[in-house]
Image: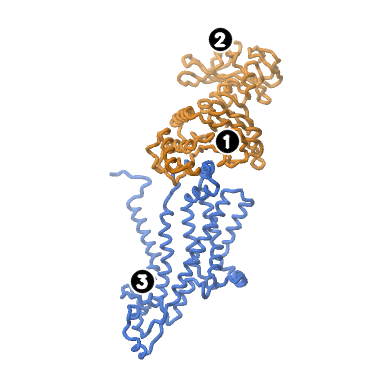
Chain colours: A blue, B orange
Amino acid sequence: MSSYSITEPSKRQKWAAGSFVIFYAVVTLMPLLWIIATGFKSPSDAIAYPPKVVFQPTLEGYVNLFTTRTRATPEMLVQAGEPKTWYDRIVRQYDMVIAGPSRYGERFLNSVIIGFGSTFFAIVLGTAAAYAFSRFRVPLKDDLLFFILSTRMMPPIAVAIPIFLMFRQLGLNDTHAGMILLYTAINLSLSVWLIHGFINEIPIEYEEAALIDGYTRFQAFYKVVLPQATTGIASTAIFCLIFAWNEYALAALLTSGTAQTAPPFIPTIIGTGGQDWPAVAAGATIFLLPVMIFTILLRKHLLRGITFGAVRK
Amino acid sequence: MAQIKIKNLRKDFGTFNAVKSSTFTIEDGEFFMLLGPSGCGKTTTLRMMAGLELPTSGEIYIDGEEVGQKPASKRDIAFVFQLFALYPHMNVGKNISYPLLSQGMPKDQVKKRVAEVAEILGISDILKRPIGGLSGGDRQRVALGRAIVREPKAFFMDEPLGALDAEFREHMSEELRALHNRMGATTVYVTHDQLEAMQMGDKIVVMNHGSVEQFGKPQEIYDWPATMFVANFLGSPSMNFLRFEGMLGTNKSSIEMNGIDFKIPTALEGAKGKLAIGIRPEHIKFSDKAQYRGKVLATEYLGTTQIVTLTTPNGDVKVRTDATGKIKTGEKIGLNFDPRTVTIFNAENGKALLSNANQGVFNRG
């Protein structure tokens, strides 16, 4: 009964640790939960003081997010007749009619193309470079690696003006290709360094065994190294995507029309017809989903220690 | 199966010379040991033979074909790594079948081969298991399975038992030797363990500082070492060296040390200056009549034998003798050297002097 272990924490320690984790989770999740809640409030509930925790949920914010609306005169309303759909009905409360879709859908799609596109290139190029740095005798290896890292030693926004001018010269302003190129370049140092570390951990004997077994260098890389580096590559991909997805400043400066991503677009919702906080919150909520889904999908790779026990160290 | 010939093989890493001009031949079907202390170039030599390193100069012939600059995949050999290097993301069966798949062998044939090999190694029941949970011995067997499944021209093994614990090592070395006897494939085996080399090898190459010190059958090397390094490296305890200043004339069959004449195998080579008499601990006998005497420093009891350490005017000497004799520390005992087993070394350059006893071994090496 009175036996105790040095490694097993006591009940009190477990309680303390558990309470701390829950407290921390509440503190960090609170703003997020507030945004999600605000997305389902009516505009008056959203700015109510004291703030409302319990409220009548409505999809107004989401309707406003995805549509543009015009104020209609009573004659026009009569002419339009009874509202036909649930979103018509929501809009009609304010004597408005839906004029058409908003640009949020396009902006969101731009974010998907640019975010995932740049992540893809950062990972492919980063893995190739990291493998070369790890396995081949690259002249000036350490200097090159340092140089690659040094591109991250200042905030990317510090070079926004030169990039803007270069992009204008090259005709890359406000294009998907330009933004993918930019985010790939910024993420590449991170991906090279992280994946380099992961590949260094993989014993070179695996490739040598594959080479002797009759495989080419590329096959050895593809069939033996890559499956074991999945964990590292997956976590690196998540970091790259989160950066590209959330980037605001450069996107605001370099895109305006066709290639504008969601982050610079969301604040512009405020400007059209009063401060429409529920629509902004709805935009932010939807904006969160892809990164969350991506992270959840890759989570099993992050947790799986596939190289465990394969080599005795 | 094939003969392997190494000719003037040399490897430099930058300014560091890892292997100096090695030459030796491994006959078809031999179990061949590359023996030496760590850093002596034995692993580098093996890796050059396998194609994992390219030689700086020199030639490697496998089955008569020069392969020195060919990639590993073109040499038709198998390699067993010290840390096994089993693919962790595949199960046992996939690991073993992997080399066959690279040759494009049909699936059903692969399955048959893998089953055969698993039968030989006694691992049929674990083919579906992942690598992660296997014991050291089973991993070793899987690694062997991956090597033999392709029936290559030769097997190269880089300290394959190094990662196993002592008890299991013994068992695995027997298994390995039995496997070799059954398959008769040319095998090159790197080890730093002299006992393992002598137990398992048909032939041994002893390397030191990147060069070949001696090359031959285990017993020849043990009895007639070509250098003091080899004499010291093989055997436990190692050969005794009685160092003195003196001279040895050609065709003499005795040598004078400290004013005492010792009978030796007839010298075919003379020398003068710093010399050493080399004699194995088991070839020294205690004798009250002997003129040469030593004082007992310590005794170590080893069951059937004991090792007695004595101090003599020419350095400490270890004697292996029956465990039954009672020997007291501090006692002075006469030492008799079996004259047929003595090797005289030139202590300046460490080389053994040629005598009619060791000439046969040296000429072959």
The image quarter containing residue A82 is bottom left
Q: Which residue is mark 1?
A: B46
Tell me the number on the disc at residue A130.
Answer: none
Tell me the distance, in whole angstroms, between the alpha carbons under discs 3 and 1: 68 Å
Give the mark, 2 or 1, whose residue is nearer the N terminus. 1
SS for dot 2:
loop
Tell me the distance, in whole angstroms, between the alpha carbons under discs 2 and 3: 104 Å
The image quarter containing residue B315 is top right
**Amino acid type assigned to the residue bearing label 1 in the image:** Leu
**Amino acid type assigned to the residue bearing label 2 in the image:** Asp
Q: Residue under mark 1: which chain is it in?
A: B
SS for dot 3:
helix
Tell me the number on the disc at residue A37.
Answer: 3
Q: Nearer the viewer, mark 2 or mark 1?
A: 1
Q: Residue under mark 2: which chain is it in?
A: B
Q: Nearer the viewer, mark 3 or mark 1?
A: 1
Tell me the distance, in whole angstroms, between the alpha carbons under discs 2 and 1: 51 Å
The image quarter containing residue A4 is top left
**Which quadrant does the C terminus of chain B fall into?**
top right
Residue B243 coordinates in the image, percent (x, y): 64, 21
Q: Residue under mark 3: which chain is it in?
A: A
Tell me the number on the disc at residue B288.
Answer: 2
Comparing B146 with A31, the one in front is B146
The residue positioned 48% from the left and 53% from the top of the image is: A232
| Marks 3, 1 in one chain | no
**Which quadrant does the N terminus of chain B fall into?**
top right
